[in-house]
Amino acid sequence: MKLKFALLAVYISLSLNTFAQNESVDTIKARQLDEVLVTATHQLTRIDGDGMLTTVQGTILQNLGMAKDVLTYIPGVLNNNGSIEVIGKGTPVFYINGRRMRNPYELEQMKSQQIKSVKVITNPGARYDSGTNAVIRITTVKTPGDGFALDTRTNLGVRDYGFGSELLNLNYRTGGLDVFSSLHYDYKKAKGSSTNVQNTWGQSRNQTELSMTAKTREQTFDGQIGFNFTTGSAHSFGAYYQAMSNPGRSHGKTHSSFTTDGLTPNLNLLEENSKNERYQHIVDTYYSGSFGRWTTDATFDLLWKNNRANRTVDNMEADADNGPMKYIDRNKGRMFAGEINMSRPLWKGSLAIGATYTDSRRTDDFSTFNSPISGNDDEIRESNVGFYAELSQNIGRLMLRAGLRYEHIKSDYYEQDRIIEEQSKRYNEFLPSLNLVLPIKNAVLQLGYSRRYVRPLYGQLRSTVTYYNEFLYETGNPNLKSSFTDNLSLNIKYKWLIFMANYKLMTDRIITVCESYKGDPAVTLLKKVNSPDAIHGYEAIISIAPGFIGRSYYPVIMGGITGQSYKVNYNGRTINMNSPIGIIRFNNIVRLPDNYMLTANFSWRGKGDGENVRLGRTWQIDLSASKTFNSHWDMKLSFIDIFNTARKTTFTIYSDIRDVHTEKHNNLRSIELTVGYRFNVSKSKYKGKGAGNAEKERL
């Protein structure tokens, strides 16, 4: 018996040493020694260079179903009912096999079995566009083999109304040639309601109460065709064309009342019908190759977007002779972008250099009929030239990465083909970044700094005034400046515990304020402005993933806070918007025999402040059951927000002498069934990374 325990102790020591030396092994290890079974689970997430790398292939995560299901279990990432965010950083930029993801449906179409690893970068370096606050890099499994391949997925569900989507991917591979195409269709129909209370504090108190209901229907038609050709292992090139159409309709009603000092209200009823048509075309080409010790990647993109929205608003209690109000909003965008990146080994690491160029235009033609607001015709023309250099070195146990990016931007604003000099801008910016990684005994420490800036979206720069109802308008601001952020981050990994912290100083932050429209105290205008004061923000997150408990239960717990230090002038006094927002995620996987799997995910977000907005509390529970039948078929049944607790969201905007409180009711509770089939599938060999990616988002 003593000999058995001695042998067992030796075996455990050797096993743990093996796991410590090889962090890429992620599967359950088990051996039997004299009828004693020893099991150990290796941690799936580790610090890797500039980010946190989570292995998916060969782990329980690969059986979750879709890519967004996997991201739910990644430290620092939030899946808010399909909207992926990095805590404190907002929506990340996605790369798939080094190629920038241009179509958000790519993520919805990707299955978990296709993912090899996921890397989350919370402090992007000089390689990335200036407006990139966080990056998620997905590496897929590459399956060799030639011939015809098919991958299809059908999704059907009910949320108020029925919804569904269909995806078909086709590949043909022979030798170095890979020809690929895809077709995607998505249908959604929904209804919702909201209440809005606006207070204006002056010599008298003016209060507006709005009650709104709406029904929407939206479709997406998306198609892509392209090729990739590889000559040996040193060179490859390819191109693709993608077209997307996104038509939609909506119908809504708004009941409103306006009172002064609580006197008899003025009542009104509006009915609105709208029709939207959106079109997008992308042509992408790339080249990737090696020349001696240099590796080169070059990408060129062309993008066209064309959107048209028609709205008709009827005042049901006004004189019928006035007729309905009509609005026609047409905006077009086009962009050309090119990007080249080169890297080579240097001393104890590598050197990377690159250049980018984008040239873009966006026009807005807004016309009105029988409306209290006027139309406009404006255009924005921009060009952006950028250069970067990044050096990575391994000095003993320390890994150091330092970079510098320079960008020159020329932005011209036109109204009716006449340039407006005071609204045209020039930028010349140097953006440094630094990242350090140092192992300390059983822990790994990562410290990073970067300076980023975000230019306003084209929609935020517009002068168009959107009419919601007779008491609420919304507009952009052509005078907006870029917002700058200095980020300082700290990540620590110790065994199965991960700690992530971030501090950021934000100047000229773009926020939403409330003001009177043309001096009318009854009408609130929501407008974008640069914050007059800097915002100090912070995040702190702890993620606990102990691996399998027993052989079947896999829990992941994440908790944290995100907060700020900010003051707002409101109703003649200064108020502190410093309440932190708490976040809790408790995700669970139960593995059952015969390829069945259950998941139960709990999410909670507390109330707190962000900029000049106070957010309300929300929480929900999601359940799913899935089964893989063989290498071809899989099925998943999901129950989203089973208690319907996330249907209500609330927020309040504080600004000057106004506050606007909004409460939205949108049903998220749903049941959906997903069935997938695949044959001889491997991911496309297309290696293009895309160019002008930040500009695509702004357009």
Image (cartoon, rainbow, N blue to C red):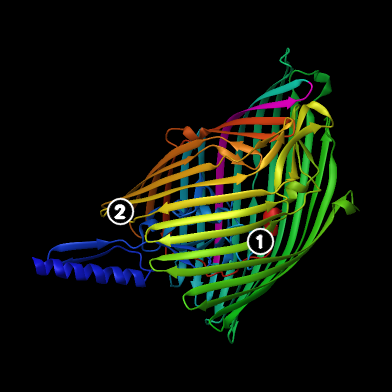
Question: Identity of the amino acid at label 1?
Answer: Arg
Q: Is residue 276 magenta?
A: no
Question: Identity of the amino acid at label 2?
Answer: Asn
- Image quadrant of residue 625? top left
Above or below, comparing residue 96 to residue 162 in the picture: below
Residue 203 x/y as whole percent: 79, 21
Within 10 Å of disc 2 (Cα), the crowding (few <14, some 14-19, many 20+) is few
Image point (51%, 38%), residue name: 606
Question: Badge 2 is on which residue?
Answer: 595
Look at the image and tell me whether residue 368 can be seen.
yes
Of the two numbered discs 2 and 1 on the same chain, state the one appearing first in sequence: 1
Left/right of residue 174 with respect to residue 408 in the rendered view: left
Q: Indicate the quadrant containing the N terminus: top left, top right, bottom left or bottom right.
A: bottom left
- Image quadrant of residue 642? top left
- For the stretch drawn in magenta, what is the main secondary structure? strand
Give the CA separation, mark 2 to mark 1.
47 Å
Q: Are marks 2 and 1 in contact (CB under 8 Å)?
A: no
Left/right of residue 534 with respect to residue 20 in the rendered view: right
Q: Which residues are magenta?
A: 180-203
Mark 2 or 1: the one toward you: 1
Q: Residue furthest front?
A: 573
Residue 406 x/y as whole percent: 72, 68
Residue 184 x/y as whole percent: 55, 52
Residue 240 x/y as whole percent: 62, 65
Q: Viewer-proximal residue, 680 or 530?
A: 530
Q: Viewer-proximal residue, 695 or 401?
A: 401
Image point (43%, 72%), residue name: 144
Question: Badge 1 is on which residue?
Answer: 451
